[in-house]
Image: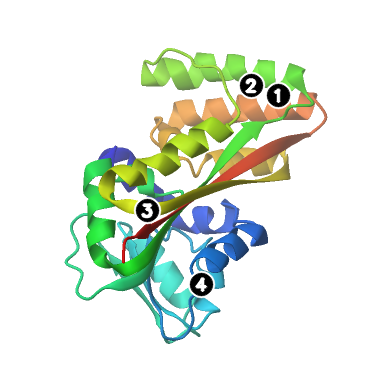
Amino acid sequence: MNELNRTFDTVADSYEKLRPSYVDELYRAIFEYAPIDENSHVIEIGIGGGQATLPFLKTGCALLAIDYGENFCEICRDKFRAYPGFAAVSERFEDIDLRGKYDLIYSASAFHWIPEEIGYKKVYDTLKDGGVFARFANHPYRDKDNPALSEEIDRIYEEYYYKYHNKKSEPLLEYTEEQARNRALIAEKYGFTDIRYRLFYRTRTFSAKEYVMLLGTYSDHIAIEGKIRSEFFSEIEKAIDRHGGKIEIYDTIDLQLARKAR
């Protein structure tokens, strides 16, 4: 997992441009549950390209971003230089020595990189009494309305991705409410209360070239040897062009909220 995690920082510029942000309704749900303002102290775990950062900074809070990638931290220091309360530190969350207590800690599509028992315990210990942990992530699902394209992409994955990683192929499944609920309840094991979860949906459309550029920001795709990865992406691009020249991605975004007891 740590080896894959390191790959993101090698494509930090592409990641910042191509990875999606999150829907406004998600932020409204967080701020209704945990109102924050210029007096609040917030941590973001795994800032990446800053896809989930701006709505928090706009509240006026002091925000400390923690990310393993120095390139990501440099990009975000420049991106959010207009916000004096922003700081970014290039370390792993599980290793950093944090002083003080925080009102809100959140992580967007990044918390799964941290071992559960380490991550949840450290978040709990770092929050103020009554402080909030918000964990959310995007789960993309390939084109529902173009089954012929999906079947062809599945065959390409079998030939390149699964063969390279020496893994058995797995069916592509849409993220479910049950999965979101089960993920939310993990926090209960570590002393959190008032646990809630919600799902949000959206659709994104990509050209063939745009889609393979996006695939190039995923750790397990980056890890494929260069020549094989180039052939793999070329075959996917050609498949999309044969089936209309675009691909629809259906996103399910899950949000889990939990509170440290007062």
* Badge 1 element: helix
Q: What residue is rendered at 66% in x and 59% in y?
A: 25
The mark that comes first in sequence, 2 or 3, is 2
Give the answer, above or below, for where 176 lies relative to 77. Answer: above
Q: Which numbered disc covers residue 239? A: 1
- Judging depth in this view, the residue of 113 and 12 nearest the camera is 113
Please, is residue 260 above or below residue 242 in the view? below
Which label lies toward us, 1 or 2?
A: 2
Q: Are marks 1 and 2 in contact (CB under 8 Å)?
A: yes
Quadrant of image for the N terminus: top left
Read off the residue under disc 2. 153
Judge whether 236 appears above or below 135 on screen. Answer: above
Q: CA distance from mark 2 to mark 4?
A: 37 Å
What secondary structure is marked by label 4?
Answer: helix
Three-letter residue code for mark 2: Ile
Dot 4: few (<14), some (14–19), or many (≥20) neighbours within 10 Å?
some
Name the amino acid type tagged 3: Thr
Q: Tell me the tag on residue 56.
A: 4
Q: Position of residue 234 (x, y in %)?
A: 61, 29
Q: Position of residue 172 (x, y in %)?
A: 57, 22
Q: Position of residue 30 (x, y in %)?
A: 53, 62
Q: Amino acid at mark 4?
A: Phe
Pointer 3 residue: 193
Q: Quadrant of the C terminus?
A: bottom left
Mark closer to the chain start, 4 or 3: 4
Q: Amino acid at mark 1?
A: Ala
